[in-house]
Amino acid sequence: MARPSKKSEIVQAAAELFSTKGFKATTVRDIAERAGVLSGSLYAHIDTKEDLLIEIVRQAANEFAQALAPIVQSQESPTAKMRAAVHAHLGVIASSRAWSTVYLDEDMAFSETGRATVRQLRRTYEQYWIQLLEEGQQQHVFSDIDIGLTKLFILSALNGFHRWYDPKGRLMVHEIADHYADMILKMLA
């Protein structure tokens, strides 16, 4: 197995630190120390600390999208797709906790340019949820409710999971996902 590149080690270190300390409280020195490089040599791999943040968000957004794309494109029923989408979303959060925490929590840390990039990444992912809801409505499986608000409601509920989920808690991720999916599907009926 190939050893991760120094840049990927730096990005991973930044994700871990940003998720626990926050972007603003994390220094370049913190990142360099965690990645095992001198802080001056960090800039041989990155341009700015914000570039690291954008890279983390880009990779997390890609992971969320890769989890949902096959579900949306499947031939399953809208109900089965929604259930699978809830499982996929919570699964990404649980398996990539640091990355998803940064993706979900660090909105205010971006410059205007960075914010525009992140907004586009999120819109792309949210489009999958819109497709699921539209398909369910077109097939008369989901009620005729406002799709934009419903998407926001569902994602707000799912995205809060990373704040309270404890892997050592009484419920496994798939059990929580089942409960969430049941509630969401009741709302959509």
Image (cartoon, rainbow, N blue to C red):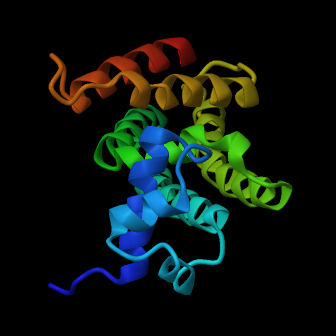
- Which quarter of the figure has residue 85? top left
Horizontal side, residue 127 vs residue 33: left or right: right
Is residue 77 among what the camera can see?
A: no
Q: Residue, x 58% and y 47% (percent of image)?
A: 23
Q: Position of residue 3 (x, y in %)?
A: 22, 83
Residue drawn 44% across the image and 55% down it: 15
> Considering the image in quadrants, where does the N terminus appear?
bottom left
Q: Is residue 181 above or below residue 28?
A: above
Q: Is residue 90 visible?
A: yes
Q: Quadrant of residue 51?
A: bottom right
Instruction: Choose between 151 and 56: the one closer to the eye.
Output: 56
Q: Position of residue 96 (x, y in %)?
A: 35, 50
Relative to 89, residue 174 above or below: above
Residue 63 vs 150, above or below: the answer is below
Counting from the top left corner in percent of width and height, residue 38 is at 42, 76
Q: Nearer the viewer, residue 96 or 26?
A: 26
Where is residue 160? Give x, y as percent.
49, 25
Q: Residue at x 48, y 28 (%)?
A: 158
Compare residues 22 and 132 and report the one nearer the observer: 22
